[in-house]
Image (cartoon, coloured by chain):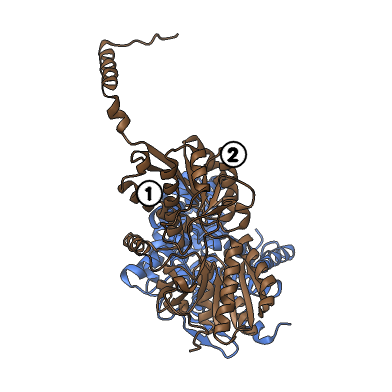
Chain colours: A blue, B brown
Amino acid sequence: MLEFSILLPAILNGLTIGAIYALIALGLTLIYGVLHIINFAHGSLLMLALYGVFFLHSLFGIDPYLALPVAAVALFGIGYGLQRFIIGRASHGKDENILLVTLGLSVIIENLALYLWRSDTRTIETPYSFEVLDFGVAFIPVPKAVAFVGALLVAALLWLLMTRTDLGRAIRALARERQGARLVGINVEHIFAMSFGIGCACLGVAACLLLPSFYVSPQVGHAFVLVAFTVVVLGGMGSFVGALLGGLIIGVTESLGGLFLGESLGQLGIFLIFIIVLLFRPTGLLGQKA
Amino acid sequence: MIKTPRVSRRHFLAGTAVAAGMAGFPAILKAQPRTIKVGILHPVTGPLAPSGQQCRLGAKLAIDTINANGGIASMGGAKLEPIYADAQSKPDVGAAEVEKLNEAGATAIIGPFASGIALATTQAAAKHGIPHIVDVGVVDQVVTRGLTNTFRFGPGLNKIVDSAIQNLVALNTQAGKPAKTVMIVHEESAFGAGMAKTLNEKLPGMGFEVLETIAHANPTRDFNNIALKIKGRNPDLLIPSNYYNEFVLLARTLRQQKIRPKAIYSILGGAASQYRFVQEFPDAAEFIMDCNHWFDPRNPVALELKKKVEAEKAFFSYEVFLNYECVRLLADALERAKSSDRAAITHALASSGWSNHFMPYGPTKFVNGQNEGAAPVNTQILQKDIKVIFPKDFANAKPVFPAPRA
């Protein structure tokens, strides 16, 4: 029999881990949900970002939270370059080619990481790694609370970007009608690359918020990429609020699933809720019909 | 059109000169020491790569040392030539790599770290009669299938679990039996699940009540729920059996949630006997105990090797020193076999009584391929170092049990 003293902390914990999923999915929802680029290299790029933050901390003593602007800008640059010079050119805009190119990129990035940094698991310890917020019924680790707030802020920023800026309008126009967008003077290749770059910048932010409580290894992306795709589809393709909501739902589902079904079976809950939601809302929670 | 091979005058003269030279100086050519090809097979990519790469490092250091010291004396100073192979963390790839090593003329194989891969590689090596020294691969079936080519230098799972329980009982009795209840947290594959099953069978008979056994997936991204359950049941002892990443996340979460059982007593703990863990999380690691593979901490050769490994900016983990010793075990067999013939090496290994190692074992004695002299030890992380606390003959520290609450 589960007591309230366990149930409530489990829900709170689910929300914090869900915020991490949402952070990773926010970039993906822009790339995958809006532009329909199936980016299989998303996990590998997250890994690259984590290594970047790790080395900034271990070599120069830069705190992961202070490294946030650097990581975001660096990942934006990498993302922009990848889309503009590799993915866009090599795939010729065809969906099946994009799939193969991003899959190939992920293999190359992972193996490069393996070659350069070996496959050791690396972690960092910060002064706040073991700090907790005491809510009476539950202890919430400080890094997870920060990640939760960070996910909300990033979702809000992306929403503002998409609805209140020319860039956002251009991205939306491009997602809806590529030829039309080109005809009204939008530089399609540049906007695609900008979107990809922004999606990757989200990974830079996610890496800064994740590393104080997690680890990095060349394979670390695998732990998150499938769940991030699930969150994007569950929340509704292209919806930032949906990705946030989807992430939180998946986090709480995983947490409660672990509590009721056992830790190894608990992850089944993620796919169970995914199927149930899509049965009743095929476009996802906040997705719009095409 | 078929071309008739033509030999030019210049080629003919050069060939004649070489032939004459060879006929004139046969003794010089024969004096060149031969090389002995050794297959070094580990999972150096895939999820097990961190361990596999450590394994390869240990084997490489041993081969370099043996070669630098003059090679195999009984074979005219023959040098060991490693052929590195990658099992990619998959048993079927491991077996395929054995085929390649056979083609390449490997006289013996050392590896492949994981039990699942070892079951496949030893079987594949048996087909070609290649002697296979298993470095870690603790699952007992590795040496119970009657394969005459298989030799496991380290102890098997049953022996490790038996020793762990025996030592735990002794530890608890010495301290006035403060521990009565236990929770087990294990990873869900054959290694962790097998361990949990054995512990559930044996612990109740030893005066311990198992409150709950929790399995978790690999990878597990978050251990807060498990920590909550542990907090709710408040066991005296926590016994974790998992791989490095999950062990680290579990230990960090326990620390964050301020959960301090009387002891964290791990068996083949993924991180509990790893200097990396101690160095990166000294506070979370302090007082954690482990029953695992370890070296004799008083042996100067082991300490010298530790320094050498650390000088290479690597950690002196059991993967490193077990592989180092497996290569030396093979070198000892080669010295006695005086031949690189596979059957002769197999025979020499089967009759091995090697005692010049730095493990806390007796002389090697293989019975059905298992080194009966092998044994695990108990370690405890004390003041940012890993100390041996059991058995007394090899101990370099006294156990701290129960762990201080503060």
Q: How many numbered discs?
A: 2
Of the image marks 2 and 1, the number of the one nearer the N terminus? 1
* Label placed on residue B63: 1
Q: Quadrant of residue B93?
A: top right
Circle 2 sits in a helix, a strand or a loop, which is it? helix
Question: Which chain does tag 2 point to?
Answer: B
Residue A57, percent across and down? 36, 70
Q: Which residue matches tag 2?
A: B127
Question: Which chain does tag 1 point to?
Answer: B
Can residue A101 be seen by looking at this rendering? no
For the residue pair B280 and A43, the one nearer the viewer reads as B280
Q: Is residue A195 above or below residue B35?
A: below
For the residue pair B154 and A62, the one nearer the viewer reads as B154
Residue B85, percent across and down? 47, 45
**Which residue type does callout 2 highlight?**
Lys
Circle 1 sits in a helix, a strand or a loop, which is it? helix
